Amino acid sequence: MNDAVKQTLSKVPEVVLGFWIIKILATTLGETGGDAVSMSMHLGYAVGSLIFLAVFIAAVIVQIRATRFHPLLYWLTIIATTTVGTTMADFADRSLGIGYAGGTTLLVLLLAASLAIWRWAEGSISVNSVATPRSEAFYWVTILFSQTLGTALGDWMATTNGLGFGGGALVFGAAIALTALAYYFTRISHVALFWAAFILTRPLGATVGDLLDKPLTQGGLDLSRVGASAMLIAAIILLIRILPQRPGEHA
């Protein structure tokens, strides 16, 4: 399939600075929105996971069946992966009692398996290759695992290691900055660096989200989860409208 055809069929946005800004906001929204449903509404992690999983499946089906790139649909699907990732990780870590270390290890294995199977089946895990329904399916499954992993990793870093939510956000922010430097100044695979940055934005968003809505006694700012989520949704919609949103070449 030539590049022109891939660009026509691609429903994945061009990876530029605006992409990463919206992605971080979406991952932060995933944390505040997931907590709003599972904790503030007292539905629990299991029910919250089922609700968001249904939204995620529906969004992915619509996204795959779409014939062209729709920015709002794409980012809605991303937000669905972050919210279901939040509640699924919390369910595994807390309700099932496997802990942050156990949850993180399990999700690392699932993510690695997803990437390996995608690479074996399609020959590439580059987002440049996401131009068919099958490659899109691999793309979204991989993203779901990466978002769930990010929640578990963020919680583990912030709580178990005693960094706090602010400290955890600084650590993951620094890791993303180092990944960006590696992109520009090393010969490390750009595909590998893309997925590293994509994965790291999730724990960054998770720790920032927890910083916003956790009680003061836990090191948070104790903001309303619903209010914080509403502000993040408004910011995401505004950025989608004002920043260039187009499919095409991907870093």
Image: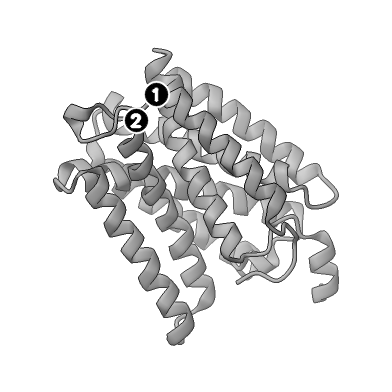
Label 1: which residue?
A: 224
**In this view of the protein, can residue 101 be seen by the observer?**
no
Label 2: which residue?
A: 213
Q: Is residue 16 left or right of residue 202?
A: right
Q: Is residue 67 left or right of residue 144?
A: right
Which of 24 and 10 lies nearest the eye of the viewer?
24
Residue 30, given in percent of the width and then of the height, sits at: 48, 37
Q: Report the number of discs.
A: 2
Residue 107, given in percent of the width and then of the height, sits at: 38, 47
Vertical position of residue 109 compared to residue 250: above or below: above
**In this view of the protein, can residue 55 be seen by the observer?**
yes
Q: Amino acid at mark 2?
A: Asp
Q: Is residue 41 left or right of residue 71?
A: left
Residue 201, given in percent of the width and then of the height, sits at: 43, 54
The residue under the point 48% across, 50% down is 24
Of labels 2 and 1, earlier in sequence is 2
Few, some or many residues within 10 Å of mark 1 (<14, 14–19, 20+):
some
Q: Quadrant of the N terminus?
A: bottom right
Few, some or many residues within 10 Å of mark 2 (<14, 14–19, 20+):
many
Q: Which mark is residue 193?
A: none
The residue under the point 48% across, 71% down is 192
The residue under the point 76% across, 60% down is 10
Q: Are marks 2 and 1 in contact (CB under 8 Å)?
A: yes
Q: Secondary structure at mark 1?
A: loop
